[in-house]
Structure formats: C-alpha cells, structure tokens
Image (tube, grey):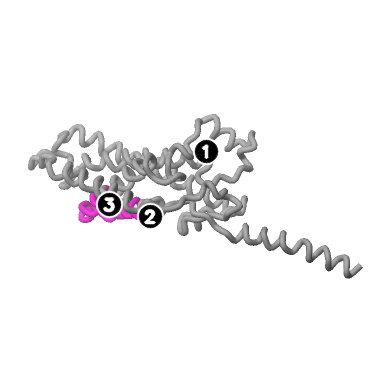
Amino acid sequence: MASSTGALVREAAPEIAAQTVRQVERRMVWDLPVRAFHWALAVAVAASYFTHTLGIQYFRYHVWCGYSVIVLVIFRIAWGFVGTRHARFSSFVRGPAAAWRYLSGRSHDKERRYAGHNPVGGWMVLVLLAILLVQAVTGLFGNDEIADVGPLYGLIGNDWSLRLTSLHRRLFDWIAVAIALHVAAVLAYRIVKKRNLITPMLTGSKPATVVPADQAIPSSRIWLALSLLALICSVLAVIVAVAPAAEIGSY
C-alpha cells in the first residue's frame, strides 16, 4: 500500500512541479509608460485638489498641476492608438452590451481572465480620461473671481471664463465619484475575487496563468513614449506662450 502511494506521488510530482512553475512565472502586460502615467496622474489630480483648497496664493501651482493633467491625459489618449498591445483602446474597448453582460454576469465573460482591462474596466478608463481632460482644459480658461486667471483667459473674456469656471468646479464632484468607483472596484477584486490589480500596475506583469504567451508584450517602447510626451509638452507650451494676456481690470 505504501509503495503504491509512493509511486503515485512520484508520478504526480512532475505535473505538480510544472503547475507550480506556471503559477510563479509572470508575463509582461502593462508597459512602463502606462504604469508611469497611472501613478503620475493620481499624484497630479491629488495635487490639483489640494492646491485649490489651500487658497489663491497657491493658484499658480494649481495651474501647473492642470498642465500636468492635460499632458498626461493627452499622452494616454495618443498611447491608446500607438502604444503596446494592452494599452491600445482596440484591445479593451467593447460595446455597451458587452460591458453590461460582463457586469451582470449573464455571459461566460464573467469568469474569463483578461490579460488587460475587462469590458467594464475599459469603459472606466474612457470615462476618467474624458472627464479629466474636460476638467483640465476648462481650467485653462478659468478665473478665481478675485485676482488670478487661467493662461488662456485672454482668448475668451470674462463672461465665457465664468461659465467655464462654473463647469470646472462642478465637474470635480463627478471626478470624485468616478475615482471612488475605480478604487472600490479594485478593492472588490482584491477582497471578493482574490485578484490583485495593484501589483501588476506597479511591476507590469501578471501570472502566466492569466496571460497567454502570445499576449505578453516584448517591450515598453519607451523611446516612442518619451518622444510623444516631448511633443505634447512642446505644443502646450507654445499654445500658452502665444495666448493673449488678460486685460488688466477685465476680471
């Protein structure tokens, strides 16, 4: 009996070892530009909020935070077309019906392990990018109704500036809701499904059991990302530099 048990263990050992190797092995999914964008955007949004709440003496720092958000969001949108496999919108943006089926659990997609974003996560990415871009761009034309104005205020004048400032302020509530939903989803995956979404956004890799070999990315295309980032920064700098100055007393 003992010898039979030992033989079974020896026969199963290679299979167990191979399974362990597969579980330990990790494959790259998120490139470095995507990971850097994710955490830099989180810092820029938080800094934008705090520089606003600290008062008008921090207005110029608030503006610089706004610049950062604009550059980062436009970069991510561009990277969604020219970046690595799982960074591209074509790899994770699905129709509303697919997102609803995944969310409601009425399809086998609910149990599918996506290498990149799932259909719901893809829509969350789009919503966050859109609302943050509108928020940051309206800030360029805004004013604090006291002494400071955004760098593009001179293009539109006070009436339109006040309208955009009002939108800029009201949008923050929606941004807060979207961020809260994003954080709640990450925590739900960690607690309920036992899936860690934070570590892959730090290391870039996921277990090989989730990422087929043909879906792993070979590189981060860093030089392309740096070139794109430099171009976006340059264009924004030129726009701000050539914008007409606000007339004294116009606000």
**Secondary structure found at label 1:** helix
> Label 3 sits on what residue type?
Cys
Say which residue label 3 marks.
Answer: 65
Side of 135 where 198 appears, left or right: right
Q: Which residues are magenta?
A: 43-66
Q: Amino acid at mark 1?
A: Pro
Viewer-closest of 14 and 237: 14
Give yes or no for residue 48 being in the magenta stretch.
Answer: yes
- If the image is split into quadrants, where does the C terminus sit? top left
Q: How many marks?
A: 3
CA gap, disc 3 and disc 1:
30 Å
> What percent of the width, then of the height, locates residue 23?
62, 58
> Which residue shows up at 40% across the image and 55% down it?
32
How far from the left and from the top, in percent, is residue 226?
Answer: 30, 52
Q: Is residue 161 above or below residue 35?
A: above
Residue at the farthest right position: 1
Q: Mark 3 or mark 1, which has the lower sequence index?
A: 3
Q: Amino acid at mark 2?
A: Ala
Label 1 belongs to which residue?
119
Instruction: Name the residue that disc number 2 marks.
Output: 36
Q: Is residue 7 left or right of residue 203?
A: right
Q: Where on the picture, by quarter, is residue 108?
A: top right
Element under disc 2: helix
Residue 18 shows in this picture: yes
Q: Position of residue 200 (x, y in %)?
A: 50, 55
CA–CA distance between discs 2 and 1? 23 Å
